[in-house]
Amino acid sequence: MSDERDPVVSDEGTAHAIEVTINGETHKRTVLARQLLVHFLRDTLGLQGTHVGCDTGSCGACSVIVDGQLIKSCMMLAPQVDGASIETVEGLAQDGELNVLQRSFNENHGLQCGYCTPGMLMAATDLLRRNPNPSEDEIRHGIRGNICRCTGYVNIVKSIKAAAEAGAGAAEEASR
Amino acid sequence: MLLESVEYTRPRNLDEALRALASREGAAVLAGGQSLVNVLKNRVASVDLLVDVSRLDELRRIEVGADGGLEIGACVTYDELERSDDIRGAQPMLASAAGHIEDRQIRNRGTIGGNCCLSDPSNNLPPLLIALGATMNVQGPGGGRQVPAEDFFFGYFMPALEPGEILRSISIPPLADDAGVGYQALSVGHDSKAIVRAAAHVRGGDTIEDARVVLAVVGPRPVRHSAMEDLLNGAPASAETVERASEAIGDGDGLEPISDAHGSADYRRRVARVLARRAVYEAMMRGARS
């Protein structure tokens, strides 16, 4: 965490020096209190894999994992993640290769327009960590916070199920 | 979306938080933020200082007293309520209700204190906390005070908090050996916004005692239905008793349900009668089983 010091006050509110680790890389930035985490990721750091869907905490397109917990990044302020470790969709692929879950979405047609996909992938990553072999009901409960307006969820559920069967769950559980 | 200019502070303890909160009129407590951040986006409240209490250890504890009563810190999240062995053991209905709030992302951030202090009449936890006989432990600049849960939810988005006060924790007395709790809701969708809620507590075995029947989303605040409770207390624990007592829910009983896209006032009143009945049955069954 960054050193304790008084934030800078201007007519834009307070600015805070924060230090966060994102997909294993440490970033130090000064952020305004009024900046949402999702805009910190997308605009300040250029990590545009995390999407803004509804901007009201309903759709889950902006889901990321903060200190091991799935959250919606449009519902947190940037200064709140000072000292945190964040995982975003950019961290899933390893050495340029899609991971098992991402490949499964590809192979099972788990997306159409792709807008919800980053959030779905992070929700599924979180689910498989907690429950490496989820039932269909458990998968649907796990992605309750993520809205897809194209697929009707059938192929998304199928993709997550297939990823679990291909060992994605066991791998995620081991990575906890 | 860019929020309006705002200042942010993360106090290191409750005293610092109280001082920050008292420092200006536009200061607001930020806990899980799952409602407040949307309020800030909509610019419907004039907040110029956010006092982030979400990381304060002293607000994040779950303690079990010698008598089996619970004291739950205001910043304990829904997910922590659902997973806590202490809560599952002492108040399984609270753990279960917390596990059905919206979705995982919200359960990871949203807090029991935030759910209460928003005082949204459709929120999950207030009616249940009233049925459980909970007490809200409030801390202000001049010290602490206790507010019974049934007096805390004052009106639409109005908790019984004075300016400068923070909800510190919630105390829930232990359930008696012969007590049972029921909780029913009719929701728009799975785990989502409720059209009507009913929570009930009964004990006594063959004869009903200590009946508490709480209805929510039928007015500006969750309320105990004392006419129905009076018909339950002292009566035999039977289907007929519950059926007859639920008929007390109707015109002239003080409920003020609204009409909206999800149901008319009349519909809500009818649903309230059905859910109150089911909640009391459920409480009787659970009490008999324990």
Image (tube, grey):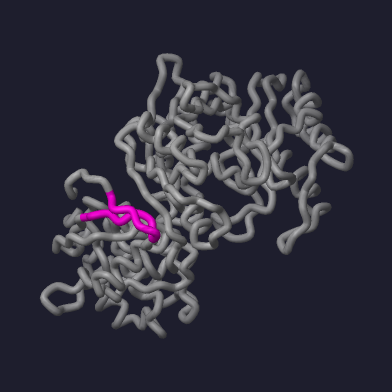
Q: Residue at x 70, y 40 (%)?
A: B215
Give residue B166's position: percent from left, percent from top.
48, 33
Give residue B277's position: percent from left, percent from top.
73, 39
Q: Residue at x 44, y 73 (%)?
A: A53
Q: Is residue B254 magenta?
A: no
The answer to whether B207 appears left or right of B108 in the picture is right
Q: Nearer the viewer, residue A59 or B84?
A: A59
The answer to whether B56 appears left or right of B272 in the picture is left
The answer to whether B157 appears left or right of A41 in the picture is right
Give residue B54's position: percent from left, percent from top.
37, 42
Q: Residue at x 33, y 53 (%)?
A: A9
Q: Nearer the viewer, residue B110 or B277?
A: B110
Residue B161 vs B187, above or below: the answer is above
Q: Quadrant of the N terminus of chain B?
A: bottom left
Give residue A65's position: percent from left, percent from top.
29, 59
Looking at this view, name the residue that lies furthest to the right.
Answer: B252
Q: Which residues are magenta?
A: A7-18
Looking at this view, name the residue that lies furthest to the top.
Answer: B66
Residue B92 vs B38, above or below: the answer is above
Residue B139 vs B220, above or below: the answer is above
